[in-house]
């Protein structure tokens, strides 16, 4: 399908392996991920609750790039491969890309992820780097806008805590804390390996199976992320902070509910984003007029996120006309809820999404992450991929018209006063 063949196997140690063959491509990408990220502040291991300092997942990601006291990045470079990693709220991913043979860098990827090589010196050295990263984000108005919006929306959900964690926790994270997090979340049974390659995936699978015989699972305990019940109302209806900027930033956010199944949440996420694109993008003929009237600038967008445990819509912009922007968004949300999208706009957006999805199949990193998330959250990747084609305009309106948009919060980042 779509010039792709896929094989999947769960190994004896629990490692979940998904290999995608891309015929005719010389490039390969392999991604190894644990299903633990910024949300994993509290976990339940069988009947035992485990608490971590905030930011553990991200801090550990920084620490992982050592193997046998050597710099993993340099080792990959010697193998004609480039490596990187990232931490999200729900997973931590390590990957490499290469146009050469995959076997040596693939062994290295698995070896360094499945071995913890840290000490007091390495942890202390990385602390200063992460604190600098934290301070940099604190000084970014775009980052602060989103961070403070989440804090206004959520009281208990861990999304109100930045992925980097609280500064005081970063200052206190120790070898012992990181080792505890690693031992729980980096067992092979908690890992997923995704490969996208033009090379023979059956031979690659045989190589992985043989390689993993040296890494038996050390735990058969069930791990569950703890997400506490969240209040329906926003925490702060309005929040303003001053920064060293010349033009204000504003975000209007709506707190909505999650859904009983990930499949339904995915469908709602798609429908809502399509409707937002029709209202607050160049698809709307009024968009240029808002720019001309300086209600918005080039920094302006709308996005949503729906899952089983959360749901929200954000509109944000850089603008000197903050009140006019807030009024505009309130009008758009009334339209979002009460006015069906035109057939013309629906078909245009649907076709653009289908085209973007097809192009995305050749973006190895995005494809690997999408397949990873479908595997971790246990939904069918191809059904998710094709849902934009099956969504109808009536379904879209039914979804958008069902929301209670009364739980709104406004976040403003404004210039410092003299």
Image (cartoon, grey):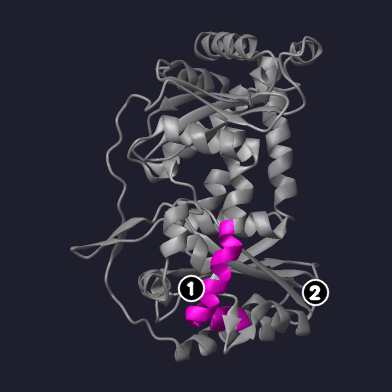
- When asked about the image quadrant of residue 42, the answer is bottom left
Above or below for 283 versus 193: above
Q: Which mark is residue 198?
A: none
- When asked about the image quadrant of residue 5, the answer is bottom right
Could you tell me residue 202's position as x and y percent? Answer: 62, 79
Above or below for 347 versus 203: above
- Residue at image point 51% right, 84% down: 209
Q: Which residue is mark 2?
A: 99
Q: Which residue is mark 1?
A: 9
Could you tell me residue 200's position as x and y percent? Answer: 69, 78
- Residue at image point 51% right, 74% down: 123
- Residue at image point 62% right, 60% down: 368
The 10 Å Cα crowd at callout 2, few under 14, some 14 to 19, many 20 or more, is: some
Discs 1, 2 touching: Cβ within 8 Å: no
Q: Nearer the viewer, residue 141 or 329?
A: 141
User: Can residue 10 be seen by looking at this rendering?
Assistant: yes
Could you tell me residue 169's position as x and y percent? Answer: 42, 57
Secondary structure beneath disc 2? loop
Disc 1 and disc 2: Cα gap in Å? 24 Å
Pick the quarter of the image with the C terminus.
top right
The boundaries of the magenta stretch are 108-131
In the image, taking residue 335 as reference, residue 216 lies left or right, namely left
Query: Can you tell which of label 1 and label 2 is closer to the viewer?
Result: 2
Name the N-terminal-most of marks 1 and 2.
1
Give the farthest residue toward the left.
47
């Amino acid at each position: 399908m779509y010039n792709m063949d896929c094989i999947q196997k769960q190994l004896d140690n629990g490692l979940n392996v998904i290999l995608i063959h891309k015929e005719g491509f010389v490039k390969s990408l392999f991604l190894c991920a644990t299903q633990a990220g910024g949300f994993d502040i509290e976990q339940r291991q069988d009947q035992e609750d485990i608490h971590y300092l905030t930011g553990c997942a991200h801090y550990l990601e920084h620490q992982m790039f050592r193997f046998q006291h050597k710099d993993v990045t340099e080792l990959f470079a010697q193998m004609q491969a480039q490596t990187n990693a990232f931490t999200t709220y729900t997973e931590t991913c390590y990957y490499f890309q290469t146009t050469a043979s995959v076997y040596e860098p693939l062994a290295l990827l698995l070896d360094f992820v499945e071995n913890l090589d840290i000490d007091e010196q390495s942890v202390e050295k990385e602390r200063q780097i992460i604190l600098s990263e934290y301070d940099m984000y604190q000084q970014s108005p775009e980052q602060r806008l989103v961070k403070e919006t989440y804090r206004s929306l959520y009281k208990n959900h861990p999304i109100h805590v930045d992925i980097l964690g609280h500064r005081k926790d970063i200052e206190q994270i120790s070898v012992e804390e990181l080792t505890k997090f690693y031992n729980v979340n980096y067992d092979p049974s908690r890992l997923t390996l995704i490969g996208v390659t033009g090379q023979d995936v059956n031979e690659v699978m045989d190589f992985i199976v043989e390689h993993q015989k040296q890494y038996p699972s050390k735990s058969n305990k069930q791990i569950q992320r703890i997400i506490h019940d969240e209040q329906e109302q926003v925490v702060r209806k309005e929040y303003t902070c001053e920064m060293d900027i010349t033009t204000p930033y504003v975000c209007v956010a709506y707190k909505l509910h999650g859904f009983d199944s990930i499949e339904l949440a995915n469908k709602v996420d798609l429908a809502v984003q399509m409707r937002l694109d029709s209202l607050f993008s160049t698809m709307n003929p009024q968009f240029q007029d808002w720019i001309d009237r300086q209600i918005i600038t080039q920094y302006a967008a709308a996005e949503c996120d729906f899952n089983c445990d959360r749901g929200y819509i954000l509109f944000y912009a850089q603008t000197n006309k903050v009140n006019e922007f807030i009024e505009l968004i309130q009008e758009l949300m009334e339209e979002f809820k009460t006015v069906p999208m035109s057939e013309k706009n629906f078909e245009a957006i649907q076709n653009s999404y289908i085209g973007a999805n097809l192009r995305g199949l050749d973006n190895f990193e995005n494809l690997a992450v999408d397949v990873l998330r479908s595997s971790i959250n246990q939904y069918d990747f191809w059904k998710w991929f094709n849902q934009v084609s099956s969504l109808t305009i009536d379904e879209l309106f039914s979804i958008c018209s069902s929301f209670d948009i009364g739980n709104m919060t406004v976040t403003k980042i404004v210039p410092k006063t003299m």
